[in-house]
Image: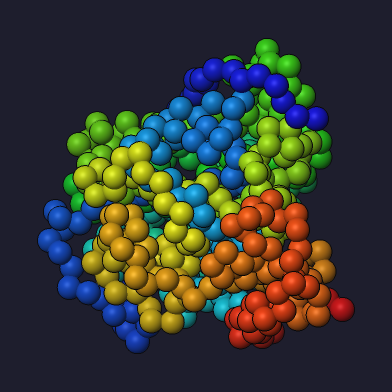
Amino acid sequence: MRLPSPPLPLPLSPPLSCIGSFRLASAALLSPLLLLALPAAAADKPNIILILADDLGYGDLGCFGQRHIQTPRIDRLAADGMRLTQFYAGSTVCAPSRCVLMTGLHTGHCYIRGNAKYNLRPEDVTLAEVLNSAGYATGLVGKWGLGHEGSAGVPTRQGFDEFFGYLDQHHAHNYYPAFLMRGEEREELKNVVPGEGDFGSGVATRKIEYSPDLLQREALAFIDRHRAEPFFLYFAPTLPHANNEGGKNGMEVPDLGQYAGQDFPDPQKRLAAMIGRLDDALGKIMAKLKEHGLDENTLVLFSSDNGPHREGGNDPTFFDSSGPLRGIKRDLYEGGIRVPTIARWPGKIRAGSTSDYAGWFPDVLPTLAEVAGATPPTNLDGVSFLPTLLGAQQKDRPPYLYWEFYEGGSAQAVRLGKWKAIRRPLGGERIELFDLSQDLAEERDVAAANPEVVARLKAAMDESHVESPLWKVKK
């Protein structure tokens, strides 16, 4: 079932607080991997805020075509900055996508290539380490998914001075958890979650503290604390992911706000209200920057970790959450990996601009390193797209974009110019080919008519996949 008519804007609530630990123990840990550029004077360095929504679809925002869910503050961000209409996540699910974002390595090279209980290693160099070494105060508020308690993969051992939120992605399903992590310690909350297990997932029977409100409050407090120095805030709220443990009642939100009276199924009212809360959180962050006179000297980059989900009772077709794209979360079709992306930096990024630069999460680390005046590791799969953001010619581009995925029998995908190829299973014989310039919805497989293109993209898949002892195709 799809939708007829649109509604109006949604109010929202406040949130809590954080203190971290570790400002990159020693540059020697990184030395061969991370060379530092001579930093500009601290006062000249822009602040950087990276906002990553969770399972937000390409078509879920007003500025990307959504007609029924109101996102006025995110739409304002786009009006004040640039929409990147061909930008891709690192994967089609959470953990690998975030690993790609943090390390600049695609899923054929990075350590965490799927949703599993693995942890980043000491030798993995993250975006936070690069920026921290360039003199930035670094904070993560929200969902991490790349390291568990006591491991080398926790944020405060991966370059973040401060962390408040969820370490484990299954814990992050629960919007009313019994605890959140502050640094490397558990901070107890007033919610009651029976049978939560080691990682804290489950469904609360006593729902008092809603985690997105606590995360929002913490993000604002981080800006307050670091307003006098260059800072990097990675704000990764869990909205609008479902609490999968809640079954068809997994779209957890305290109230339906302006959508209470709408003629939508209950899960869709809840999705809309969750996206409204995400919009409100962004609005409060922008207001906080303005309050401190920082909004002119802050680059804000907004995106999503993958496409929309069909979990917790949500129907991604109801609001056309994938927009004109085929597929959703867990697909390597465009709807699973192309994500709504916005960049705002007054005086640098032209307001109201749009770019069709075909970029992806591996580009984020080198781009933000260039903004910060740091030199990133040399083995990255992405390039800096700062020229695109500044309206200059983008001379440096990745040779192609690549993904691999291990669920559902496994798959690989490559994008090269207008061509997009998908192979299932990974390493298999059958390859679909689509011309995205003529067929954005990936409805017409033109592989048979273009054998040379298929051969070229197959070769790209073969060279991009590096064997990992952790990630094997299930026969």
Query: Furthest residue to the right?
Result: 475
- Residue at screen point 54% across, 17% down: 8
> In this picture, is 388 found above or below 212?
below
Figure quadrant of residue 194:
top right
- Residue 38 horizontal side relative to residue 156, left or right: left
Q: Nearest the camera: 175 or 353?
A: 353
- Residue at screen point 72% across, 25% down: 3
- Residue at screen point 64% across, 36% down: 176
Q: Nearest the camera: 178 or 251?
A: 251
Q: Measured from the top left, where is residue 299 in percent x and y?
A: 31, 49
Number of numbered discs on residues: 0
Q: Measured from the top left, where is residue 439 in percent x and y?
A: 66, 54
- Residue 114 horizontal side relative to residue 102, left or right: right
Which quadrant of the figure contains the N terminus?
top right
Query: Furthest residue to the front?
Result: 449
Which quadrant of the figure contains the C terminus?
bottom right
> In this picture, is 147 found above or below 137?
below
Can residue 322 be spotted in the picture? yes
Q: Measured from the top left, where is residue 471 in percent x and y?
A: 71, 77
Coloring applied to the structure? rainbow
Can residue 16 be spotted in the picture? no
Query: Furthest residue to the top?
Result: 261
Q: Measured from the top left, where is residue 208 in percent x and y?
A: 61, 28
Figure quadrant of residue 464:
bottom right
- Residue at screen point 25% across, 33% down: 290
- Residue 367 horizontal side relative to residue 5, left or right: left
> In this picture, is 353 found above or below 169?
above
